[in-house]
């Protein structure tokens, strides 16, 4: 396999930083030296800043300030988790261990880089000691800032080789940059999948067997009990009766209608492509109106039909999934439509430029000549700056204007060139050449952008707007639209059968548990209300109801998670040849709540990260903290909406508890609690254990 | 359908369902895998060479060596030590002690699923709290232990007897000094009278202490503790006496070689116990002697002297035989969490009092949880079933009641079993290891992945397994017993010991446990059938089923029938 063909990984892999110059000898010994620019600065802060900049597309404006250390802190406190995970090159051996404090978010991001050159090689090796992955040696040479890195492992040799290669590509200046937040899709399996490495290597697999055996025994026991008490293995079976009481077909029809409704988004994009609607001006507003209407219609329909809560929650959750899919599709394609238009505009300008006659004599007007000089020197300087200073590079990045079609408001090179063309003043052949080069570079850049993840370009922007592509996207188990995903070669039908069996098995277990253990407690609260007990009397019963529901609700919660993220999504992925099974991380090892929020539901997390967090930073210019808050708030609101639909009352308990997690997260990041891994995990599990039961009881009792 | 063909090579197993878990590191090597699973293997030499070429044995792999991420200095020492050990050929079967961590140790490398371990603790704690809440609601007291008197009744007496028992084991030391002073010709020398006297002493000792609780009519909790402790001490004493006895013989022979060698000097090869084939990766002596040209150049007497000298030196080379016969060493050995005596054990550089505190806390926490479980979920079921059984004389009704009891006891017994396992093998033994600085924390292997009962019995209790392997299996092999017979004998002895424990708990000697343990042998034979043996998931499920139902069935049998 060649590293050149894989989806671009940008610079967060171990050796991608262009500040690292190195050579690799045949025997796997690589020698690296820190680049001159960095050596002058001599600060880790600047270094870290560079590698944050290199892939944080949404927040260019904010990051261009010079305060490297502040940025490091900022980065430290918020988001650098997904950078260290999905990259296959960093996943050497068993390096992903969230319980390991050195790899947790909130620790020094430099630690996640295994071979970062550092001014303190000894300290760095000490940090690495925790990782238990690969043997490398970092030797100091006589020259300052130069180290020799030796790896005995063939795997890391390969990685080093690739890193050096990639670096050469980057050094030659052809580094592709994608404007939209770049999520890396890789081939991987879910942790509980039998095919995954983590599961097959884990020494604790026997306990997994024990868990399912215990579930089977639980079912057997409760069936026996039902048979003795009711004469039927299903018992009184109220839950099933409630689920299938009415409107089952209507639910199916609604679901079909929801799917059909998604095509409205597709047609909006077709209009945008045809130029009937301008995305930047009115298109996105139209899309948002449609999305709001979609959700409102769904909720209204559920109310109107007086569905049982199971119907409602299914329809609403499914609707939300469709909504997110539409949003991602629309906003990504909308952005690309801007890029496409800009490219067309620039091509026109280029044509104009090529038609112009170069003037060999000196320009007549001194002012114009000055202007020309300015252009020329500015461009030359920029070329120089690209090579030397990373700060300037960050400032000069063209990405701010990727989808703008109004060149008069810009300050970029291209805008200057366009202005020069527009002015019609004569130019010298040298200038003509420079201008042409700039235009070509920008157009190449935009073409790259239109290709996105689709390296061969067959599905690049305008050609991806086909019904077939959209229909396929609807079925894929992801909420983030990309022009291409990693795919599998074939479907393993045995695997599909296995996961389907698991799906129905888990559904059965959930049904039995809710009937046998949860229903009695819920029925008790309803009886209490019917008997007209006062709130004080009911409040006295409250702890017992909570304690009755603790264990069954925990199991229900775990099973629901397993059902959706392990069974259903895997079936869907297998059927659609979708190869990236990163549907969840190891959330059970979470130490803080934000870690859990990121890991348990990766598709939604990826969606929120790209379309809420980064979009709010780039389009509303929020700070990172504010953007985190907005993301959290949105998620809490949606959750509260689900609760309101389930219990038919708006109380805000879940909402407030979810928002309370923010200070909790802050507390767990404080100096004293940061390294208390086990304590953090226990607190997390306590919350997950007590939370659902407590909330359910609150909504039921009060 | 655009596919990324270039990453295909990286994930060659992309579409194939892999086996759930590669059981052992070298499971691909059939003969070795078979050997590791404790099956007879004729091609002994290939096994050993394979094992030698890949030093990390499964036992090393499954419990992480701290040397993995240790500083190079530590690693170099450990490697040197291991190579020295590999060169050494010992006559008495040895146990391979290394610095290792247990699976559930907080410092262990296996953290992928650590969250679920924490979850189980959180779950148990919540179970305890809700139980207390319920008691509070029903009785008005937070805790209402009907079992409380069980614990407190004979506490003083139990403590006194326990101390006395520990003291009485120390008799092994003067006895051994007596045997040692008998010299090469004395009637009481180890291989003649010494062994007999020691055996007689041990039998008397164990009979006395096992019957003591019956005489004093203690409660069953006190008795179970005392019985288990006396069995453990018995094994310790046996190991101490027999290993030192062997060393005294060796020393005598070594001294004899100092004198001019006459016709009376025994020049026969030192007694070579055959190695336990599945654990010991060192080459068989014969093969080694053929390969090793430098060794064969030595004269037989020199060779013998060297062998004998190595035998009386500890594996780490710091202690030689007679120097270890001190009271201090004996007390240290009593406290060490092991049942096999060695001249020297790997030690931790320092003791962590925090760890000790946590482990002690965990011991009491586990005992509390076990009490809550039995109070809440076991005793009521047994009481009501007992009462109902009294009133019925119809056989079918009784059988139904019995089946219901078994089904109701399934989960509580599973929890109790896991708690007992944790409290003994992780916390009590861990605490003692912390006190003595004992570095080899491999008190259990990954038994939860077992496929059959034999594997489980090997893995869940490594100290006792080591003892049986060294002092029952290998010892019986040394008196010309064939391998299957030796294995059956080992199993038989272990079944008897289990039956004794069950009998002491319930005061009924019914032999249910014995029968069920012996029933495992044909069952294992079934599981070894060619079609079944490769289905790991199936076998593991069967194992867990047997575990769950077996415990609850046994309890119901002993208590109700």
Image (cartoon, coloured by chain):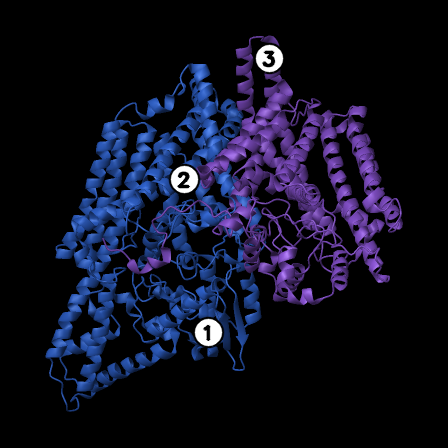
Chain colours: A blue, B purple
Q: Which residue is denoted by mark 3 in the rendering?
A: B389
Q: Are marks 1 and 2 on the same chain?
A: yes
Q: Where's residue A398, x and y in %?
A: 28, 69
Near-viewer residue (A611 or B366)? B366
Near-viewer residue (A366 or A272)? A272
> Label 1, label 2: how many angstroms apart (C-alpha)?
46 Å
Near-viewer residue (B404 or B488)? B488
Chain of the residue under the numbered disc 3 shown in the image? B
Position of A259 relative to A274 (above/below): above
Q: Which mark is residue A27?
A: 1
Left or right of A272 on screen, residue B36: right
Q: Is residue A182 visible?
A: no
Q: Secondary structure at mark 3?
A: helix
Chain of the residue under the numbered disc 2 shown in the image? A
Chain of the residue under the numbered disc 1 shown in the image? A
Q: If the image is split into quadrants, where does the N terminus of chain A sit?
A: bottom left
Q: Are marks 2 and 3 on the same chain?
A: no
> Label 3, label 1: how many angstroms apart (C-alpha)?
79 Å
Q: In the picture, residue A391 is in which quadrant?
A: bottom left
Left or right of B88 on screen, residue B399: left
Q: Are marks 3 and 1 on the same chain?
A: no
Identify the residue shown where x is 82% and y is 33%.
Answer: B204
Position of B235 relative to A615 (above/below): above
Identify the residue shown where x is 38% and y is 42%.
Answer: A566
Left or right of A192 on screen, residue B439: right
> Label 2, label 3: how many angstroms apart (C-alpha)?
42 Å
Q: Which residue is denoted by mark 2 in the rendering?
A: A562
Q: Where's residue B361, x and y in %?
A: 67, 41
Identify the residue shown where x is 10% and y is 78%.
Answer: A355
**Residues at discs 2 and 3 in contact (Cβ within 8 Å):** no
Decide: few, some or many residues near mark 2? Use Cα within 10 Å; few <14, some 14-19, many ≥20: some
Q: Where's residue A321, x and y in %?
A: 30, 43
């Amino acid at each position: 396999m060649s590293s050149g063909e894989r989806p671009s990984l940008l610079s967060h892999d171990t050796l991608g930083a262009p500040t690292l110059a190195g050579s690799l000898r045949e025997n796997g010994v690589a020698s690296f030296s820190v680049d001159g620019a960095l050596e002058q600065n001599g600060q880790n802060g600047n270094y870290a800043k560079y590698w944050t900049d290199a892939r944080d597309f949404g927040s260019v404006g904010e990051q261009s300030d010079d305060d490297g250390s502040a940025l490091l802190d900022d980065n430290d406190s918020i988001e650098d988790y997904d950078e260290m995970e999905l990259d296959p090159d960093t996943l050497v051996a068993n390096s992903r261990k969230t319980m390991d404090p050195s790899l947790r978010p909130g620790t020094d991001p430099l630690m996640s880089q295994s071979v970062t050159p550092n001014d303190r090689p000894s300290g760095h090796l000490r940090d690495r000691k925790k990782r238990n992955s690969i043997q490398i040696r970092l030797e100091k040479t006589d020259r300052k800032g130069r180290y020799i890195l030796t790896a005995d492992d063939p795997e890391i040799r390969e990685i080093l080789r690739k890193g050096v290669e990639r670096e050469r590509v980057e050094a030659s200046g052809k580094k592709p940059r994608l404007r939209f937040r770049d999520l890396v899709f890789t081939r991987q399996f879910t942790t509980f999948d039998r095919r995954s490495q983590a599961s097959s290597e884990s020494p604790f697999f026997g306990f997994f067997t024990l868990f399912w055996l215990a579930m089977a025994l639980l079912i057997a026991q409760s069936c026996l009990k039902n048979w003795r008490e009711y004469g039927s293995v299903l018992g009184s079976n109220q839950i099933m009766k409630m689920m299938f009481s009415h409107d089952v077909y209507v639910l199916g029809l609604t679901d079909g209608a929801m799917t059909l409704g998604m095509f409205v988004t597709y047609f909006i994009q077709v209009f945008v492509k045809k130029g009937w609607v301008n995305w930047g001006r009115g298109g996105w507003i139209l899309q948002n109106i449609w999305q709001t209407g979609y959700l409102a219609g769904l909720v209204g329909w559920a109310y109107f039909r007086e569905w049982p809560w199971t119907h409602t929650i299914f329809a609403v959750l499914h609707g939300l999934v469709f909504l997110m899919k539409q949003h991602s599709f629309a906003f990504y394609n909308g952005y690309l439509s801007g890029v496409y238009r800009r490219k067309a505009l620039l091509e026109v300008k280029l044509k104009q430029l090529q038609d112009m006659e170069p003037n060999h004599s000196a320009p007549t007007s001194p002012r114009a000549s000055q202007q020309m000089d300015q252009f020329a020197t500015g461009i030359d300087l920029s070329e120089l700056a690209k090579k030397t200073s990373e700060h300037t590079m960050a400032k000069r990045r063209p990405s701010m204007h990727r989808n703008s079609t109004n060149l008069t408001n810009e300050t970029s090179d291209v805008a200057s060139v366009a202005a020069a063309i527009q002015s019609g003043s004569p130019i010298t052949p040298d200038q003509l050449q420079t201008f042409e080069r700039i235009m070509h570079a920008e157009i190449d850049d935009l073409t790259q952008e239109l290709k996105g993840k689709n390296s061969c370009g067959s599905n690049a922007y305008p050609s991806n707007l086909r019904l077939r592509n959209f229909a396929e996207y609807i079925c894929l188990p992801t909420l983030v639209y990309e022009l291409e995903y990693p795919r599998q070669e074939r479907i393993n039908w045995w695997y599909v059968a296995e996961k389907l069996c698991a799906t129905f098995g888990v559904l059965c277990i959930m049904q039995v548990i809710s009937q046998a253990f949860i229903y009695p407690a819920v029925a008790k609260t309803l009886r209490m209300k019917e008997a007209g007990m006062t709130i004080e009397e009911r409040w006295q019963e409250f702890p017992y109801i909570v304690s009755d529901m603790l264990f069954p609700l925990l199991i229900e919660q775990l099973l629901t998670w397993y059902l959706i993220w392990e069974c259903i999504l895997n079936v869907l992925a297998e059927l659609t040849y979708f190869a990236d099974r990163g549907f969840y991380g190891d959330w059970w090892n979470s130490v803080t709540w934000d870690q859990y929020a990121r890991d348990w539901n990766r598709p939604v997390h990826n969606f929120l990260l790209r379309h809420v967090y980064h979009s709010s930073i780039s389009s509303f210019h929020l700070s990172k903290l504010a953007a985190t808050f907005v993301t959290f708030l949105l998620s809490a609101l949606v959750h509260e909406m689900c609760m309101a639909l389930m219990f038919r009352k708006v109380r805000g308990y879940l909402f407030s508890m979810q928002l309370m997690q923010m200070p909790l997260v802050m507390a767990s990041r404080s100096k004293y609690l940061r390294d208390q891994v086990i304590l953090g995990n226990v607190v997390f599990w306590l919350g997950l254990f007590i939370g659902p039961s407590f909330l359910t009881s609150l909504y039921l009792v009060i | 359908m655009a596919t990324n063909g270039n990453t295909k090579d990286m994930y060659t197993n992309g579409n194939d369902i892999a086996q759930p878990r590669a059981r052992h590191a070298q499971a691909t090597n059939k003969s070795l895998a078979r050997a590791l699973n404790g099956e007879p293997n004729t091609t002994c030499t290939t096994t050993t060479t394979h094992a030698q070429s890949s030093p990390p044995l499964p036992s090393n792999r499954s419990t992480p060596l701290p040397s993995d991420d240790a500083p190079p200095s530590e690693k170099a020492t450990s490697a040197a030590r291991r190579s020295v050990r590999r060169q050494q050929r010992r006559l008495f079967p040895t146990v391979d002690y290394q610095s290792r961590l247990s699976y559930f140790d907080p410092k262990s490398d296996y953290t992928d699923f650590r969250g679920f371990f924490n979850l189980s603790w959180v779950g148990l704690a919540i179970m305890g709290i809700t139980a207390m809440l319920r008691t509070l609601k029903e009785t008005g007291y937070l805790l209402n232990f009907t079992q409380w008197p069980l614990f407190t009744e004979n506490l003083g007496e139990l403590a006194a007897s326990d101390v006395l028992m520990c003291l009485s084991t120390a008799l092994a030391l003067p006895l051994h000094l007596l045997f040692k002073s008998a010299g090469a010709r004395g009637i009481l020398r180890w291989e003649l009278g010494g062994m007999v006297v020691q055996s007689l002493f041990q039998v008397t000792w164990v009979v006395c202490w096992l019957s003591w609780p019956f005489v004093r009519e203690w409660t069953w909790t006190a008795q179970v503790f005392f019985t288990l402790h006396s069995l453990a001490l018995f094994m310790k004493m046996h190991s101490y006496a027999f290993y030192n006895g062997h060393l005294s013989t060796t020393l005598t022979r070594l001294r004899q070689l100092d004198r001019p060698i006459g016709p009376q000097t025994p020049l026969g090869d030192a007694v070579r116990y055959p190695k336990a084939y599945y654990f010991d990766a060192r080459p068989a002596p014969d093969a080694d002697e053929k390969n090793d040209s430098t060794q064969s150049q030595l004269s037989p007497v020199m060779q013998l002297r060297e062998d004998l000298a190595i035998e009386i030196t500890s594996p780490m080379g710091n202690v030689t035989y007679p120097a270890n016969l001190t009271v201090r060493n004996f007390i240290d050995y009593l406290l060490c969490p092991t049942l096999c005596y060695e001249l020297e054990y790997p030690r931790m550089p320092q003791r962590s009092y925090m760890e000790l505190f946590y482990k002690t806390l965990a011991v009491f926490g586990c005992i509390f949880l076990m009490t809550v479980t039995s109070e809440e979920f076991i005793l009521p079921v047994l009481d009501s079933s007992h009462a109902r059984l009294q009133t019925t004389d119809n056989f079918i009704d009784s059988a139904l009641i019995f089946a219901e009891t078994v089904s109701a006891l399934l989960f509580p017994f599973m929890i109790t079993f896991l708690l007992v396992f944790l409290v003994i093998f992780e916390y009590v033994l861990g605490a003692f290891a912390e006190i003595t600085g004992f570095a080899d924390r491999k008190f259990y292997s990954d038994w939860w992945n077992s496929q059959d009962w034999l594997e489980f019995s090997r893995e869940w209790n490594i100290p006792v397994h080591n003892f049986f392997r060294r002092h029952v299996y290998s010892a019986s092999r040394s008196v010309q017993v064939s391998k299957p017979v030796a294995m059956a004998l080992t199993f038989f002895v272990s079944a008897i010991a289990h039956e004794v424990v069950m009998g002491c708990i319930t005061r009924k000697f019914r032999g249910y446990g014995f029968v069920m343990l012996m029933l495992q042998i044909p069952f294992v034979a079934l599981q070894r059938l060619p079609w079944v043996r490769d289905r790991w998931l199936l076998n593991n499920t069967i194992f867990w089923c047997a575990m769950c139902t077996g415990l609850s069935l046994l309890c119901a049998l002993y208590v109700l029938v």
